[in-house]
Image (cartoon, helix red, strand yellow):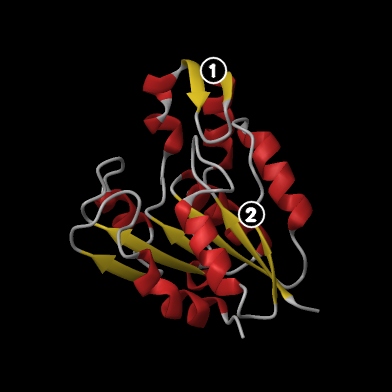
Amino acid sequence: MAKRVIYIHGFNSSDKSYKAVRFGELMAHYDVDYCVPCLNHEPIQAIIALEQLLTPNTVLLGSSLGGFFATYLSQHYQIPAVVINPAVAPYTLLKPLLGLNYNPYQDYHYELNSSHIAALKALAVDDLRHPELLYLLQQTGDEVLNFQHAVNYYSQCKQRIEFGGDHSYLGFEQTFASIVDFLKIT
């Protein structure tokens, strides 16, 4: 059975994000089942959709809010995951965005409300019981998230910290070899 590689996009993003598409181009050279689900803004629906894709031979790659979801799945199901400029506490970050929102990548309007914040808080993993399953890719120039939060939270995990960059993770292609190696993609 081929390894399943699931890419988890971030908040207000889609399955067409740059990193999802570029990583898919790389995965075309491997014998893997590459999945990039287009996730709903509702955290519980997103997690359910992701859980339905899990197989015994799954690995994860998550960016921003997708990194938060990947951490949850990694620690609950003991799955290797690479997290890219991950949101550590999205329930605090998204509070200022409560109300009407628009996802330009999926072209739909929705309301972000306190139940979404509560759902994210319920998904938070306070104690990384399997830090060896996580690999942090972090750039210090992230203008959306405080990079130090991720460096501290994932302190027991493998880390690649790059100075500069931004939230999109500039030079993402340069991390491909280390991602493939960590996730044991052959």
Position in image of residue 164 (x %, y %): 18, 58
What residue does disc 1 label?
113
What residue does disc 2 label?
36
Front residue of 117/7: it is 7
Query: Which residue is drawn at the image coordinates 53% and 63% (left, top)?
Result: 129
Tell me the tag on residue 99: none
- Closer to the N terminus: mark 1 or mark 2? 2
Occupied quadrant, residue 42: top right
- Please state, as top left, top right, bottom left or bottom right, where the N terminus lies in the image: bottom right
Occupied quadrant, residue 174: bottom left
Label 2, residues with CA under 10 Å away: few <14, some 14-19, many ≥20: many
| 12 to 69, vertically: above or below | above
Whether residue 158 is visible: no
C-alpha span from label 1 to label 2: 26 Å
Position in image of residue 179 (x %, y %): 47, 74
Label 1, residues with CA under 10 Å away: few <14, some 14-19, many ≥20: some
Q: Residue furthest left?
A: 164
Front residue of 59/75: it is 59
Position in image of residue 57 (x %, y %): 73, 73
Horizontal relation, residue 16 to residue 163: left or right:
right
Front residue of 130/133: it is 133
| 108 to 57, vertically: above or below | above
- Mark count: 2
| 17 to 128, vertically: above or below | above
